[in-house]
């Protein structure tokens, strides 16, 4: 064999070797994909991260679970990716329209529909005006119930009289905001 023939055979051998490496790597990718699909059914005991975000097929955020300096947060978003429910340490909010938050305790939301917080549960109408509230006064801890009209003005207020432990009080308000009290005395 002359030098050109030897060089040609060596070149062909190199091409076969490279082709072998190439096809072997494709087989490895196929094996890894199959292996990964099998592992999807495994149960993971613990995931450690700062935030989990679920997005829809358009890439818009649908839900978020995260930790902050004040505790854990859970957000539920509408189809446009805007916050409609927010659960944070000691508070729960549901909104009639979308909104957003800018970090712990800096919430800028749509009209609040339901609020559950320290010592108070309140429900608002679809215009963001209070409709009814149930809670306790702080720090005394006496209970109260308040009912409002469609504009958020007091209609009825039921609660305890401060300074007289077993006496209750009912205030009924007219359209001018004037009230009449009903109590034990």
Image (cartoon, rainbow, N blue to C red):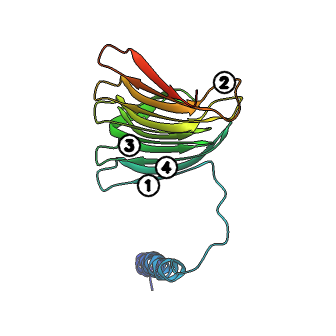
User: Who is closer to the viewer here, 37 or 144?
Assistant: 144
Q: Earlier in the sequence, mark 3 or mark 1?
A: 1
Q: Secondary structure at mark 2?
A: loop
Q: Earlier in the sequence, mark 2 or mark 3?
A: 3
Q: Is residue 48 above or below residue 163?
A: below
Q: Position of residue 183 (x, y in %)?
A: 54, 29
Q: Position of residue 21 (x, y in %)?
A: 49, 77
Q: Secondary structure at mark 1?
A: strand
Q: Which residue lies most toward the front here?
A: 185
Q: Which residue is mark 3?
A: 84
One can see residue 3 in this view: no
110 sits left or right of 70 in the view: left
Task: Look at 56% across and 38% down and name the residue there.
Answer: 135
- Of discs 3 and 4, which sits in the foreground? 3
Distance between the alpha carbons at the discs numbered 2 and 4? 43 Å
User: Who is closer to the viewer here, 10 or 89?
Assistant: 89
Q: Earlier in the sequence, mark 2 or mark 4?
A: 4
- Mark 1 and mark 4 in contact (Cβ < 8 Å)? yes
- Of discs 2 and 1, which sits in the foreground? 2
Distance between the alpha carbons at the discs numbered 3 and 1? 15 Å
Q: Earlier in the sequence, mark 2 or mark 1?
A: 1
* Neighbourhood count class around disc 4 (C-alpha, 10 Å): few under 14, some 14–19, many 20 upward: some
Q: Is residue 21 above or below residue 87?
A: below
Q: Which residue is mark 2?
A: 162
Q: Is residue 43 above or below residue 55?
A: below
Q: Secondary structure at mark 3?
A: strand
- Of discs 2 and 4, which sits in the foreground? 2
- Of discs 2 and 3, which sits in the foreground? 2
Q: Which residue is mark 1?
A: 54
Distance between the alpha carbons at the discs numbered 3 and 4? 12 Å
Q: Earlier in the sequence, mark 3 or mark 4?
A: 4
């Amino acid at each position: 064999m002359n030098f050109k023939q030897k060089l040609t055979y060596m070149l062909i051998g190199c091409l076969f070797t490279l082709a072998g490496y190439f096809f072997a790597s494709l087989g490895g990718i196929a094996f890894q994909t199959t292996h990964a699909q099998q592992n999807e059914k495994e149960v993971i005991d613990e995931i450690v991260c700062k935030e989990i975000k679920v997005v829809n097929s358009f890439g818009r955020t649908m839900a978020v679970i995260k930790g902050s300096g004040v505790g854990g947060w859970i957000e539920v978003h509408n189809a446009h990716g805007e916050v409609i429910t927010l659960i944070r340490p000691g508070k729960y909010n549901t909104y009639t329209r979308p909104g957003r938050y800018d970090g712990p305790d800096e919430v800028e939301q749509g009209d609040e529909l339901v609020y559950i917080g320290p010592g108070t549960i309140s429900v608002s109408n679809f215009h963001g005006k209070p409709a009814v509230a149930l809670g306790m006064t702080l720090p005394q801890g006496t209970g109260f119930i308040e009912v409002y009209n469609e504009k958020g003005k007091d209609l009825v207020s039921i609660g305890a009289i401060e300074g007289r432990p077993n006496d209750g009080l009912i205030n009924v308000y007219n359209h001018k905001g004037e009230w009449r009290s009903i109590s034990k005395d």
